[in-house]
Amino acid sequence: MKSITLLILASTLIALNSCKKKNDCPINPEDIVLNSNGPVFEGWPLHLWTESGFSYTYHWQGPNGWKKDYDYSTNTSGSETIESMTQAKAGVYIVNIRDGNCVIKKGSVNVSVIPPSNAPCSVNNNTSTSTVIGVGGTNYTSVFGNSNSNYYVQASNSSQAITFNFKGEQAPLPGIYKSNDTYYPSEQNKVGVYIGTGFQDYQMEPDVDVYVNKVNGKTVISFCSAGFYNPVGNATITISAKVTVP
């Protein structure tokens, strides 16, 4: 009889302890910031990130039933990447951070997906216009793309060449890139642009919109009324261009 009583008491304590643990979960989890690189262009990856913690598990949710659950051993960085975004993947993304069975923190962000747009000017294919003679303002007879440490596209003729350097070893995805005022891009959505004449390089000024599109499977790069640094004079250099990689 004594052993039965002890067994009942032990069972009661376990049940009470379980209830206590369950009731210890916060009714209103702490709101945290969930960051993203949105809005993103169609086909580009979406990057989500928030605070990290080795003692937590991360539970991600998104549009159309998308979800990812991680335990302690697989991902404690507080970040997630979704490749090749589409319009169907636009919407609200949520992260629930759990300590054991309790959701202790939560965050959300609304992500929009935008289609690539065309450059707002009309330039003939494989040509450029310019406000000065000898820098731009020409027809390009050779255009090619290749990868080294970065992916680059070069359009040239016998007197000059324009080069676009993109980050990564793959051809750039359609979208709008911002120019660096350096030869090589610092970020995935940046591009380094310069014109070489054999005597001098002329770099595009920063924060110019450079448009990349896919037309019949070919990469088309264009920009409008972009300023270029003039290292040899005071004349303002403004160039528009369009090149297609065959």
Image (cartoon, grey):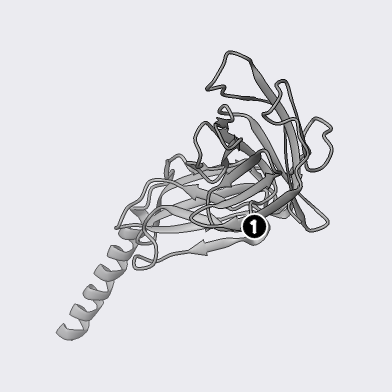
> In the picture, which quadrant includes the C terminus?
bottom right
Q: Is residue 214 left or right of residue 110?
A: right
Tag 1 residue: 84
Quick one: SS at disc 1?
A: loop
Percent from the top left, x then y, of residue 7? 22, 80
Q: Is residue 29 above or below residue 84?
A: above
Q: Is 185 on the left or on the right of 111, as rendered?
A: left
* Residue 133 in sight from this viewpoint: yes
**As drawn, 131 above or below 5:** above
Viewer-proximal residue among 156 and 188: 156
Which corner quadrant holds the N terminus?
bottom left
Pick whichever, 161 or 5, lies toward us: 161
The percent coordinates of residue 206 (x first, y second) are 55, 28
Three-letter code for the amino acid on which mark 1 is drawn: Ser
**Residue 110 percent across, percent down from the top left:** 61, 42
Front residue of 185 and 58: 185
- The residue at the point 68 percent across, 38 percent down is 159
* Residue 161 position in % (x across, y down): 65, 41
Graded by Cα atoms within 10 Å as few (under 14), some (14 to 19) or many (20 or more), the crowding at tag 1 reads: some
